Image (tube, rainbow, N blue to C red):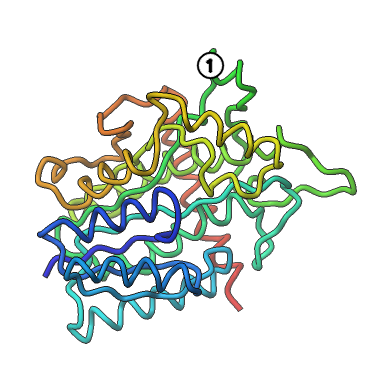
Amino acid sequence: MTTVLITGPTRGLGRATTLALAQNPKLQHLLLVGREGPALREVGEEARRYGVDVHEIGCDLSRLADVRAAAGVVRSLVDEGRVGPLDALVANAGAMTADTRLASADGYEMTFAVNYLAHAQLIGDLVDALADHARILLIGSNTYHANIWRRLLHVPAASWRDPVELARPAVGEDDPGTEAAGVAYSDAKLAILYYAHELQRRVGDRAGVAVFEPGWMPGTALSRGAPELFQKVGRGLARLPGVATPERSGPVLAAMALDDRWADVRDGAFVVRGKVTRAQPVAYDRDREARLWDATAQLLEDARP
């Protein structure tokens, strides 16, 4: 039985990936972990039309209690034999909030909480539910480092700090602004690269870990928390030739989860729009990776009742 779990399946890249997965003849069971509601049921029904066994699992990824509960549902499905062990776990869900003062239900900065901490919780809870030689796919972004184009577009690079600091919402009466929001997003994406490297060391041969960079997809639901002007510009840029779209990148991510050509990709490999690419030197730091792992364990433990 081939079983794949994907988070954030209802919009943008997640929806496109979900439907591409459902059309792959290798897939038998598809677990959709996302916010409860009509959108989750709708994409589940659409996937079923391709003959796949679909399980919708309601989960608000900004609530770690929800994430732990969703993992419990998945483990029960596996233990009961209703689905096979997870052949692939696609940690797709993401968010970019406009105000870094916004805190998750557990008190953590929202962008860091949804993009990084929720998936660290989910993956940690489901390691024992993985099939042998499973694939763990995380979503990255080249925004973690600056280049001339990102400077021209005023897209800020990461500004790494201790993970406990990254998890702390901004304070003060004044809105920190879009620059701070962009830095928070880039920090979360750099954290994903560090986490991928350390996770591979921890899981060993049990699974292969990779980070997928789908390309810049302006105008998608990811920017729904951004200012309206930013969203409007993004929708315009999305029409330009060559700009990444969910419809182009989703099938690539689905292929990474199931196709044989990606079976040996591991060690936190950085895959940019279907091509394995060496990340920038800042993305490799054993001390930061070890510290992130320890700090993550503490942050997740502190969120327990």
Q: Which residue is mark 1?
A: 149
Residues 88 and 259: in front is 259
Residue count near mark 1 (Cα–Cα under 10 Å), binned few <14, some 14–19, many ≥20: few
Seen at 27% across and 81% down, the residue is 77
Provide residue 216's location: percent of width, then percent of height. Answer: 46, 32
> Would you place residue 277 above or below residue 105 in this image?
above
- Name the residue at 33% across, 31% down: 272
- Quarter of the image for the N terminus: give it: bottom left
Label count reads 1
- Please determine whether, in this image, residue 238 is positioned above or below residue 97: above
Left or right of 103 in this view: 150: left
Residue 34, horizontal then vertical, whole percent:
45, 67
Looking at the picture, how far across and down is residue 213, in whole percent? Answer: 38, 36
> From this viewpoint, which residue is outermost toward the top?
148
Looking at the image, residue 112 lies above or below residue 147: below
Q: What type is the residue that disc 1 sits on?
A: Trp
Q: Secondary structure at mark 1?
A: helix
- The image position of residue 271, as x and y in percent, is 30, 34
- x 42%, y 28%: residue: 243
Please identify the residue farthest to the bottom as the structure is shown.
80
